[in-house]
Image (spheres, rainbow, N blue to C red):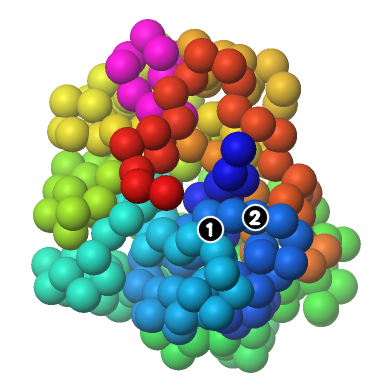
């Protein structure tokens, strides 16, 4: 059985390794098919694909799109997208521009809490001038002694009700799924267990997503408990969707699962790759 890892990040968004290094690490650790899914970005796909060919593993062009659904930020993975698709590229370009304005507001919010020039501090952690994320703020806050680690940083700052949180309007679910499908890809809801929504809203989200042509749900993710693997596998089956899995790897020491450590999908959930040519 091939080992799939369909969610990870490089220096093109908020990861710590370059796209080729991400792919090489996945290959060394026994992954057979890897998808690079940088946040709102496609720029690393060509060099990652080249590295995958050299390493002799399968490669899937992906991206993780930020979406606002009923006031909640959710993430939608696009898998097997055409990285050259014009509408998708233009849409994501606008999303990244919106991130710049948001980051300045995050800096202002942290200044109100007595943390000066966090925007400048975060910029020092940015690895692609095209994209700034809360992760870059978190790394700066840790470096400055305001938080112990990533988890601590996001529990003290940058999240609803905490300093450094600013509301932001990401694209709608319909826009994101539309761009992904327009680029020939499959849309997958990332880490559903992470959203602060109740079961009724989650089912509403999944149904709306499915009606828009969304195809999958990330079932196995470090954001989920073992019980949630079974819960989301059942949800996938009842909604006629497919199951995906990914480490959401951001870098050595920053992820709960390393490449190659993903448990298998629960039995009975149809994998998102079931229709793919090997
Ligand atoms: P952004 O897209 O700028 O809103 O940043 C979201 C990113 O922040 C996620 O992709 C994660 O990499 C990181 N993140 C969010 N919440 C947490 C958390 N609780 N622990 C660790 N990383 C987090
Ligand atoms: Mn991230
Ligand atoms: Mn995510
Ligand atoms: Mn991710």
Please say if the residues under marks 2 and 1 sit with CB atoms less than 8 Å apart: yes
Rendering coords of residue 202 (x, y %): 41, 21
The residue stretch that appears in magenta: 235-243
Using residue 77 as the reference point, say whether residue 121 is left or right of it: right
Q: Residue drawn 65% across and 74% down?
A: 24
Question: In the image, is residue 206 part of the stretch drawn in magenta?
Answer: no
Tell me: is circle 1 under 8 Å from ligand 4.
no
Which residue appears at 78% of the width and 67% of the height?
252
* Residue at the (27%, 59%) spot, across then down: 81
Q: Is residue 61 above or below residue 169?
A: below
Looking at the image, is 55 positioned above or below residue 264? below
Q: CA distance from mark 2 to mark 1?
A: 7 Å
Query: In the image, what residue occupies the spot 71% across and 77% down?
Result: 140
How busy is the neighbourhood of tag 2: few (under 14 within 10 Å), some, or many (20 plus)?
A: many
For label 1, the SS is strand
**Residue pointed to by mark 1:** 34
Question: How many badges with numbers are in the image?
Answer: 2
């Amino acid at each position: 059985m091939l080992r799939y890892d369909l969610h990870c990040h490089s220096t093109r968004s908020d990861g710590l390794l370059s796209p080729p290094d991400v792919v090489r690490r996945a290959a060394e650790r026994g992954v057979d098919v890897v998808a690079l899914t940088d946040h709102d970005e496609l720029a690393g796909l060509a060099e990652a694909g080249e590295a995958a060919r050299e390493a002799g593993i399968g490669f899937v062009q992906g991206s993780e799109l930020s979406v606002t659904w009923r006031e909640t930020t959710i993430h939608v993975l696009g898998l097997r997208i055409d990285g050259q698709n014009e509408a998708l590229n233009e849409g994501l370009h606008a999303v990244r521009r919106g991130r710049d304005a948001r980051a300045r507001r995050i800096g202002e919010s942290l200044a109100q809490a007595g943390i000066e020039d966090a925007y400048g501090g975060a910029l020092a952690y940015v690895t692609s001038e095209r994209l700034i994320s809360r992760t870059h703020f978190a790394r700066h806050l840790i470096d400055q002694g305001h938080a112990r680690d990533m988890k601590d940083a996001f529990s003290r700052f940058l999240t609803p009700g905490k300093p450094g949180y600013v509301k932001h309007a990401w694209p709608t679910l319909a826009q994101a799924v539309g761009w992904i499908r327009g680029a020939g890809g499959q849309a997958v809801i990332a880490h559903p267990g992470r959203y602060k929504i109740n079961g009724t809203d989650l089912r509403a989200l999944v149904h709306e997503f499915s009606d828009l042509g969304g195809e999958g749900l990330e079932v196995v993710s470090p954001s989920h408990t073992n019980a949630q693997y079974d819960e989301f596998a059942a949800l996938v089956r009842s909604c006629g969707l497919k199951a995906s899995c990914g480490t959401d790897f951001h870098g050595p020491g920053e992820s709960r699962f390393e490449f190659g450590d993903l448990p298998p999908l629960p039995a009975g959930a149809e994998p998102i790759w079931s229709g793919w040519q090997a």
